[in-house]
């Protein structure tokens, strides 16, 4: 008798209780249910559509109906969106024509019940001039940024995006850990391991010193202005306060000049731009450490990240067939430049890269360079040493795959 054993691969589906829904998806004048909303959620609107169009859209839940114009300006004393409490019976209806609906750019973020219960969970709709976010006196902050579309003017270059957020004057308490993530938070957003899924930036970062398996933590006093060019992202500050100016400013990120020898910053893909340079401020004749954390899982193209110190360069290839999330690459070199090269295909997708550089003392001129092969765990990898001919640098390159999700 032949016994067939079907073995079961457990497929773990991560279910996210929060949602983003686009207004253009709902064109009916008949109340239409928005699926997957949990009881005890809150709805937040982000839109730069005309008030006339928003006035003709209503959302109803729990016996309460609101027009979207009512939700648009519903902010608390600090300028954060108040949120409209909703249950699973949430419906939406519109009297706009199909043509008007098709052109809507607005969207709604529907948070989860856990987020509603969290007093440090804030949602901000970014439009116009922006504001100063002051959470300096709070030990924990989760801030969801809902950006609104800005139309381009005739003089704008084609690579200017419709959505752009800039954070400047970031002032982070030394006791805190700051994280930036793509998209909106989902279930488990306060869990420290959750961060590895869509993380784009963190401060402090962990270093892997040569020969020392223990992690050293480096806190950066200087964070270069951060520019993010998609609709939604969110920030978490844990263990201390943070403040910054937030606006819809945009500038070409093809070349970034850093402002301090020891610094960290962020760069992401820009439409039709295939080479990006980060020029590091540096003190000639000093040693340094430089590295980056990169995510390529939204890329449809290969890319190389190259770091140069005026003597030679170290390059690492990220293939579209082997996407990575929040991978660290680090060199113990006094680099003066980081360059990203993307294989030139249209709509190559998005990369997210946090760069950092640490200035050290006067060069010691010793020869050594070690590399560490990619690992799949968060354990400190073993080190192996390879010599680099004709070079007088102490170098260590460490690659850590934090998550392949
Ligand atoms: C940064 O925040 C701290 C704590 O709120 C404050 O004392 C300090 O003056 C701020 N620094 C800057 C440059 O704004
Ligand atoms: C660079 O950062 C250090 C602190 O890390 C600070 O003392 C120094 O003033 C900064 N330099 C510039 C030019 O901002
Ligand atoms: C980098 O370090 C090397 C070796 O220590 C030194 O010769 C070189 O001048 C340094 N480069 C810069 C830009 O500081
Ligand atoms: C990346 O580097 C490799 C090896 O030097 C090269 O073959 C490839 O063309 C480079 N790709 C890009 C996008 O620059």
Image (spheres, grey):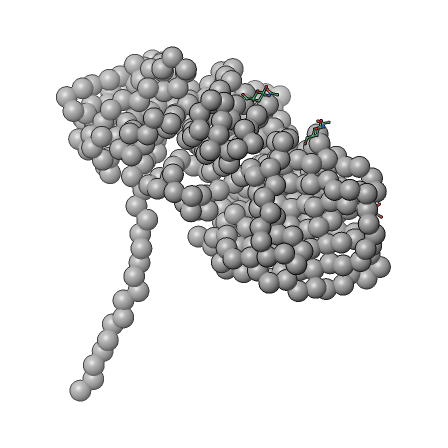
User: Residue 404, image x and y in percent?
Assistant: 47, 54
* In this rendering, position of residue 91 left or right of residue 342: left
At horizontal 31% and vertical 36% (from top left) the residue drawn is 18
Instruction: Give the quarter of the figure containing the N terminus.
Output: bottom left
At horizontal 24% and vertical 17% (from top left) the residue drawn is 66
At horizontal 34% and vertical 34% (from top left) the residue drawn is 20
Kindly tell me whether residue 32 is visible in this rendering: no
Position of residue 25 relative to residue 354, above or below, is: above
At horizontal 63% and vertical 56% (from top left) the residue drawn is 212
User: Residue 145, image x and y in percent?
Assistant: 44, 27
Ligand 2: image quarter? top right
* In this rendering, position of residue 29 left or right of residue 138: left
Kindly tell me whether residue 175 is visible in this rendering: yes
* Viewer-nearest residue: 287 or 349: 287
Position of residue 51 relative to residue 246, above or below, is: above
User: Residue 221, image x and y in percent?
Assistant: 63, 31
User: Residue 59, image x and y in percent?
Assistant: 24, 23
Position of residue 245 relative to residue 373, above or below, is: above
* In this rendering, position of residue 131 left or right of residue 30: right
Image quarter of residue 337: top right
| Number of numbered labels in the structure image | 0
* In this rendering, position of residue 361 left or right of residue 297: right
Residue at the limit of the structure toward the left, as seen here: 63
* Viewer-nearest residue: 270 or 36: 36
């Amino acid at each position: 008798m032949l016994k067939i054993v079907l073995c079961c691969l457990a497929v773990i589906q991560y279910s996210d209780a929060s949602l983003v829904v686009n207004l253009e998806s709902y064109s009916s004048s008949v109340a239409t249910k928005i699926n997957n909303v949990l009881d005890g959620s809150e709805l937040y609107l982000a839109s730069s559509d005309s008030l006339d169009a928003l006035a003709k859209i209503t959302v109803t839940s729990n016996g309460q109906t609101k027009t979207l114009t009512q939700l648009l300006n519903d902010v608390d004393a600090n300028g954060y969106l108040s949120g409209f409490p909703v249950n699973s019976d949430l419906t939406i209806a519109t009297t706009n024509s199909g043509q008007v609906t098709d052109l809507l750019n607005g969207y709604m973020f529907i948070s989860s019940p856990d987020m509603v219960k969290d007093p440090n969970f804030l949602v901000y709709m970014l439009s116009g001039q922006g504001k100063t976010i002051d959470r300096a006196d709070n030990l924990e902050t989760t801030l969801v940024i809902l950006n609104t579309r800005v139309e381009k003017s005739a003089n704008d270059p084609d690579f200017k995006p419709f959505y752009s957020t800039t954070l400047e004057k970031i002032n982070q308490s030394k006791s805190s850990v700051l994280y930036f993530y793509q998209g909106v938070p989902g279930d488990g957003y306060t869990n420290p391991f959750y961060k590895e899924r869509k993380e784009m930036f963190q401060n402090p970062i962990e270093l892997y010193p040569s020969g020392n398996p223990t992690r050293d933590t480096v806190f950066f006093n200087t964070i270069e202005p951060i520019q993010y060019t998609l609709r939604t992202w969110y920030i978490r500050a844990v263990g201390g306060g943070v403040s910054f100016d937030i606006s819809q400013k945009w500038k070409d990120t093809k070349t970034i000049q850093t402002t301090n020898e020891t610094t960290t910053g962020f760069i992401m893909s820009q439409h039709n731009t295939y080479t990006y340079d980060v020029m590091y401020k540096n003190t000639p004749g000093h040693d340094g450490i430089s590295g980056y954390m990169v995510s390529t899982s939204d890329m449809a193209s290969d890319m190389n990240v190259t770091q140069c110190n005026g003597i030679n360069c170290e390059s690492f290839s990220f293939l579209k067939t082997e996407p990575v999330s929040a991978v660290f690459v680090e060199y113990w070199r006094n680099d003066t430049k980081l360059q990203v090269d993307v294989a030139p295909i249209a709509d190559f997708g998005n990369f997210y890269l946090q760069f950092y550089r640490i200035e050290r003392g006067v060069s010691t001129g010793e020869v050594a360079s070690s590399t560490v092969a990619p690992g799949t765990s968060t354990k400190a990898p073993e080190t192996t040493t390879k010599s680099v001919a004709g070079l007088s640098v102490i170098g260590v390159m460490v690659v850590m795959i934090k998550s392949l999700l």
